[in-house]
C-alpha cells in the first residue's frame, strides 16, 4: 500500500486524538504507537512526552504540549509507524496593499 493510502486507512479506522494551536494540528493514533521514543528524542522544542495510554506493544503512547509545538512535522517523519500526523494551517491571505 502506498504512503498516502496508508494514511487514509489510518485516519478512517484508528482512534485519534487531535490537538490544535495557531500553527496547525497534531494528531496521535495512540493504538499505533510502539513506544520507541524517537519522536520524544527528536522534537526540537521537547514538547512530546509519555502518556498513560498503552499502544499496541503494551508500552506508553505519547502526547504533546501543543502550545509549544511549532508544527515542524519532524515527529511524523521520524515515527516508524503511521502514529503521528502533523498538519500546518494555511497562512491567511493578506489583501494586497492598495496603491493610490
Ligand atoms: S511537530 Fe515538531 S515541534 Fe511539534 S511535536 Fe512534532 S517535532 Fe515537536
Ligand atoms: S516515534 Fe512513533 S512509535 Fe515511536 S514513540 Fe513516537 S509516536 Fe510512538
Image: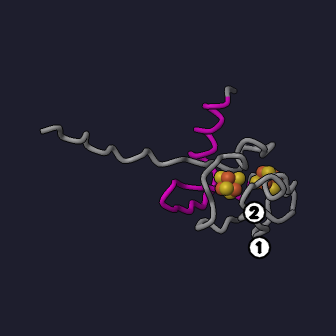
Name the residue nearer the viewer: 67 or 99. Answer: 99
* 32 vs 53: above or below: above
Residue 56, image x, y percentages? 81, 56
Q: Which mark is on residue 92?
A: none
Span colored in magenta: 3-31
Q: Is mark 2 within 8 Å of ligand 1?
A: yes
Residue at 23% x, 42% y: name it: 97
Residue 53, image x, y percentages? 75, 68
Give yes or no for residue 12 being in the magenta stretch: yes
Question: Image check: 38 left or right of 69?
Answer: right
**Can you identify the residue that label 2 sits on?**
46
Question: Image check: 64 left or right of 22?
Answer: right
Q: Determine the secondary structure under disc 2.
A: loop
N-terminal of the two: label 2 or label 1? 2
Q: Is mark 1 within 8 Å of ligand 2?
A: no
Q: Quadrant of residue 60?
A: bottom right
Quadrant showing the N terminus = top right
Label count reads 2
**Can you identify the residue that label 1 sits on?**
52
Amino acid at each position: 500500500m502506498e504512503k498516502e493510502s496508508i494514511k487514509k486507512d489510518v485516519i478512517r479506522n484508528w482512534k485519534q486524538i487531535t490537538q490544535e494551536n495557531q500553527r496547525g494540528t497534531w494528531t496521535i493514533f495512540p493504538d499505533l504507537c510502539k513506544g520507541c521514543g524517537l519522536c520524544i528524542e527528536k522534537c526540537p522544542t521537547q514538547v512530546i512526552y509519555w502518556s498513560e495510554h498503552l499502544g499496541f506493544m503494551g508500552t506508553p503512547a505519547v502526547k504533546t504540549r501543543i502550545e509549544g509545538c511549532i508544527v515542524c512535522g519532524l515527529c511524523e517523519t521520524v515515527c516508524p509507524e503511521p502514529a503521528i500526523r502533523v498538519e500546518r494551517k494555511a497562512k491567511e491571505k493578506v489583501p494586497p496593499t492598495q496603491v493610490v
